[in-house]
Image: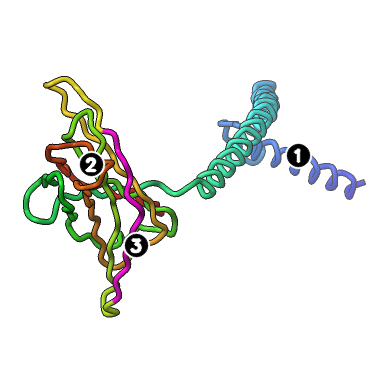
Amino acid sequence: MKQKIIFTFIIALSLSSQLVTAGSITDTYATGDTLTATTLNNIKDAVNDNNTRIINNISSIGINTTNIDINSADITAHDARITDLENASPAIGRIALSVSDGTPTKTLADATSSSATSDVFPTPSDYVSGTVTIKALISGCGGSNVSVSINKGGVNVGSNSLIFILPTFQTVSIPLGAGFTFSVVEVTMTTTSLTDLNTISLTRSGASASDLCSGGLTVQGFIVEYPRG
């Protein structure tokens, strides 16, 4: 019988210990204190409060699970966007060049063959393999056709090699604008490589039968557009 009483007392202490640990009970107890209705109500309130907290936690867990699912979807979407960016075409870099003889522009005369050459430029550090677009900007000879050719020259440092791209002459029609209008025409060519040092030249064949301008053709400058990564 004593063993049963001791065992029951141990269970009671165990349950009481769990309640004290789990609940928010501010009462203090001493050995031999009598369990009163107030004490028991305090314990009951603490247990009930824990029940409320458990329900709130379950609800919060459900909300957090939903948020995790949303974040997972967002992460997946960002992964797709990153992949799209990685697979996207490289950006375009641009280099603006002036004429190399120290003047911002150069005028090419009629009835003769003359050229304007750009400043020397190195291969950009961010250049990646691909098509390079080279443009010369020209003005003058409004309303007339002019015969021009644009080419790229280059040299690899230490090799003494020269690379020239010599396309056939193009016939370019210069628009006739109002007196206050400044018209600039692009003459364009492409190449698939750059060398260590590069130059661009535009030549006018003023004596060509297809060149109908009797005045000067002005080279305003050059633009290089290249793929960069």
User: Can you say whether 59 is above or below 212 in the image?
Assistant: above
Tag 2 residue: 137
Question: Which span is picked out in magenta?
Answer: 161-173
Contact check, label 1 and label 2, Cβ < 8 Å: no
Q: Amino acid at mark 1?
A: Leu
Q: Amino acid at mark 2?
A: Leu
> 44 or 102, which is in the foreground?
102
First-in-chain label (2 vs 3)? 2
Tag 1 residue: 15
Residue depicted at 65% across the width and 26% down the height: 56
Q: Secondary structure at mark 3?
A: loop
Residue depicted at 36% across the width and 55% down the height: 167
User: Can you say whether 150 is above or below 41 in the image?
Assistant: below
Magenta segment: does it hold 171?
yes
Judged from this view, the residue extending furthest toward the left is: 102
- Give the main secondary structure, helix, strand or loop, of the magenta stretch: strand
Question: Which color scheme did the rendering employ for the protein?
Answer: rainbow
Nearest to viewer (mark 3 / mark 1): 3
Whole-percent x, y for residue 44 in the image: 70, 25
Nearest to viewer (mark 2 / mark 3): 2
Residue depicted at 44% across the width and 56% down the height: 130
Tag 3 residue: 194
Q: Amino acid at mark 3?
A: Leu
Left or right: 104, with 58 as reference point = left
Q: CA distance from mark 2 to mark 3?
A: 20 Å
Left or right: 18, with 81 as reference point = right
Q: Secondary structure at mark 2?
A: strand
Q: Quadrant of residue 219?
A: top left
Whole-percent x, y for residue 31 in the image: 64, 41
